[in-house]
Amino acid sequence: AVYSHGINRLKMYVDECKTGTVDVEAEPIVMKEKGPTAVVDGRNCLGAVCGEYSMKVAIDKAKEHGIGWVVANNSNHYGIAGHYAMMALPHGMIGMSWTNTSPIVVPTRAKNPALGTNPIALAAPTDSRDPFVLDMATSAVALGKVEVSNRKGEKLPLGWSVGTDGLPTDDAKAAVESSTTGKGGLMPLGGLEENSGYKGYGLAMLVEVLGGVLGDASFGRKIRTWQSPLLSREGGANEKDDGGANLGQAFIAIDPGVFMPGFPSRMDDFIDQMHGLPSADGLPQVMVPGEPELNARKEQEREGIRLHDSLIDNLNQVSEECGIPRIRCHA
């Protein structure tokens, strides 16, 4: 279970469908293509539907050309970036994906948000090791993790968020509210400027250039604020509902064999180099990206999935609204 990006988003997706914020009848289409590239029009469908479709197009093109690069516009929140990158793994390919999102990240030296959390993901096949999966926000933290902290009533580590004055804050509630008020917000990856926050700021702009700008989608401050159509229907936002989010997304599949043979075995070697490093005093073994999530998944398969009470209440609310059985929990 991915608490911050998966099950935590279920109610939002259901609400988008019920209110017509997304077009549940729409199907994405390839609107333009040339060689290994394509542009997909998501037609305001659910972001996950657009993402699955677009990555399949990229994989098909990589089978023919060695690489497939697809950009999508008119898409919506697509959930877990790593999921789409990992779709390439069964085909022996490297997968990449990124998306822009509603502005909630405050650029270095600013005090109002102008960029999204803009995640980047890469998945690479291996020979006998677990696949390498990097899935990271270009902000100091993903919004979903802040929302989880808010649900639990926890304070945030300083360096994750700034208040309306542009100064660091540990108030999770204020950080979540900033996603709709347009004041304050999350910090770029790295945090403060003296801690290299400008690098995270630059990475977030990279996603915009190769997503929203390249795909002629919305970008930067032109993207609607987080969930604004839903909030406007509840009296929580003042801006006009202009329909979909029109997010810009990228999906890339690469056949490593068109470059040099033996990529999976070299990945094993690379991962083993990291695992072979001596740990700092008192710390556990060095890990590589994707391992903590994989270990958590194995534990959940053995022991079940632990959910916070507030999340269970949220899921049961969705169940009642949709007329389906409530979630079954075991102490």
Image: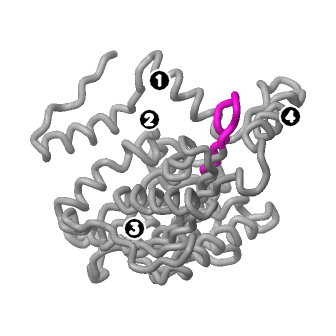
Q: Residue furthest front?
A: 64
Amino acid, disc 1: Gln
Point out which mark residue 300 bears. Answer: 1
Which quadrant of the figure has residue 7? top left
Q: Give whichever of discs 1 and 2 has the lower sequence position.
A: 2
Q: Amino acid at mark 2?
A: Ala
Q: Which residue is mark 3?
A: 226
Residue 160: x %, y % from top left: 62, 56
- Mark before the other along the chain sequence, 1 or 4: 4
The residue to which callout 2 is attached is 1
Identify residue for label 4.
273
Quadrant of the image containing the N terminus: top left
Q: What quarter of the picture does the C terminus occupy?
A: top left
Residue drawn at x 60%, y 64% is 65
Horizontal and vertical percent position of residue 210: 60, 74
Between discs 3 and 4, the one toward the N terminus: 3
Magenta-drawn segment: 125-135
**Separation of residues labelled 1 and 4 (CA atoms):** 28 Å
User: Residue type at mark 3?
Assistant: Trp
Density class for disc 3 (Cα within 10 Å; few <14, some 14-19, many ≥20) is: many
- Mark 1 or mark 4, which is nearer to you? 4
Above or below — where is 154 with respect to 85? above
Q: Main secondary structure of the magenta part?
A: loop
